Amino acid sequence: MYRRILIPTDGSELCRNAASKGIEFARVNGAEVVAFHAIPATSYMLYTESGPSDLMVEQFEKEARARGERLTGEIAELAQKAGVKVETLCLANDHPWEGIIEAANSKHCDLIFMASHGRKGLTALLLGSETTKVLTHTKIAVLVYR
């Protein structure tokens, strides 16, 4: 049915639970998993009065990449324990939903298995929903875990 499943994570408990379910789904279907994390861009996050220093940017990028590798590594460990073939990927993108779609396309995934925080009302309107944006902008099948 599905051969390659992208499982994105932001490090939240909901994403950890979704990853566990996604790995089980992959195991049952004989699919591979791509564990993914979108690393935030630094362009607007590190400004001081004099602008961002090279050292600040370098440190931020190093810490963000290490966090992404740790989070995708946790998914990889779960997948390996379940006997599911897995690879990890971290990409920098200002918009996580764009990174998720880019990752799924570049890794030839035929399913995105992702969590939804289920925000409603004004919170959903103000914060938006990465899941909704993925659903709206991709042609790849999306399974939403809540």
Image (tube, helix red, strand yellow):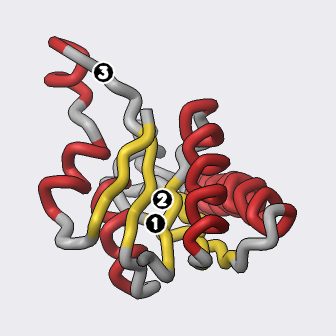
3 or 1: tag closer to the N-terminus: 1
Question: Which one is closest to the eye, mark 2 or mark 1?
Answer: 2
**Residue beneath label 1, please?**
92
2 or 3: tag closer to the N-terminus: 2
**Residue beneath label 3, please?**
119
- Horizontally, residue 93 falls left or right of residue 7, namely left
Marker disc for residue 38: 2
Q: Secondary structure at mark 2?
A: strand
Q: Disc 3 residue type?
A: Arg
The one of 30 and 56 positioned closer to us in this rendering: 30
Which quarter shows the C terminus?
Answer: top left
Residue 11 location in percent, x, y?
Answer: 62, 41
Q: Secondary structure at mark 3?
A: loop
Mark 1 burial class by Cα count in 10 Å: few <14, some 14-19, many 20+: some
- Cα–Cα span, label 2 and label 1: 6 Å
Mark 3 burial class by Cα count in 10 Å: few <14, some 14-19, many 20+: few
Q: Are marks 2 and 1 in contact (CB under 8 Å)?
A: yes
Q: Disc 2 residue type?
A: Ala
